[in-house]
Image (tube, rainbow, N blue to C red):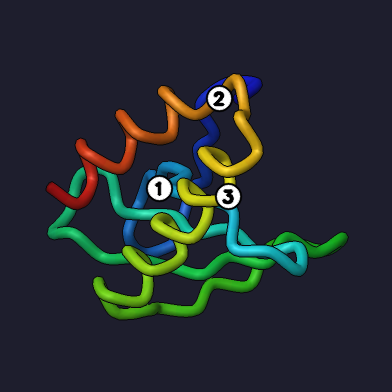
């Protein structure tokens, strides 16, 4: 993984990247507030934030982690650590 990624949500403050979700979307979680998850689509004129349930966010993260393991990605350990910190 290149580096940690953060976004600023207009209401909930800082969000951190949990996992890519495919089709130009990523799953982010709140950094400071109670744990909320967002499916974020970056667009040329800003970002679109969609609140998603915990289990959906976990599903996206598990799917991405499985793909990294299957492909032998060098980022596998980083994604495993992030998954553990976020969902376990």
Query: Which residue bears the numbered disc 2?
Result: 75
Q: Quadrant of the N terminus?
A: top right
Which label's residue is closer to the chain start, 3 or 2?
3
Question: Picture quarter containing residue 55?
Answer: bottom left
How would you rate the neighbour count of disc 3 (Cα within 10 Å): few for under 14, some for 14-19, many for 20 or more?
few
Residue depicted at x 13% and y 59% = 34
Residue depicted at x 18% and y 59% = 35
Residue depicted at x 30% and y 53% = 30
Q: Measure the C-alpha gap from mark 3 to mark 1.
A: 23 Å
The residue mark sitting in front, 2 or 1, is: 2
Left/right of residue 86 with respect to residue 26 in the rendered view: left
Residue depicted at x 38% and y 44% = 14
Above or below residue 75? Residue 63 is below
The residue mark sitting in front, 3 or 2, is: 3
Callout 1: SS: strand
Which label's residue is closer to the chain start, 2 or 1?
1
The disc at residue 15 is 1
Provide residue 59's location: percent of width, then percent of height: 38, 69
Left/right of residue 65 with respect to residue 45 in the rendered view: left
Provide residue 74's location: percent of width, then percent of height: 60, 20
How would you rate the neighbour count of disc 1 (Cα within 10 Å): few for under 14, some for 14-19, many for 20 or more?
many
């Amino acid at each position: 993984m290149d580096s940690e990624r953060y976004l600023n949500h207009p209401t909930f403050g800082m969000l951190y990247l949990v996992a890519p979700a495919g089709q130009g979307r990523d799953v982010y979680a709140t950094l400071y507030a109670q744990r909320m998850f967002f499916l974020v689509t970056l667009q040329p004129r800003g970002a679109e934030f969609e609140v998603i349930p915990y289990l959906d966010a976990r599903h996206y993260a598990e799917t991405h982690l499985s793909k990294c393991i299957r492909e032998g990605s060098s980022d596998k350990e980083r994604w495993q650590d992030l998954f553990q910190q976020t969902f376990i």
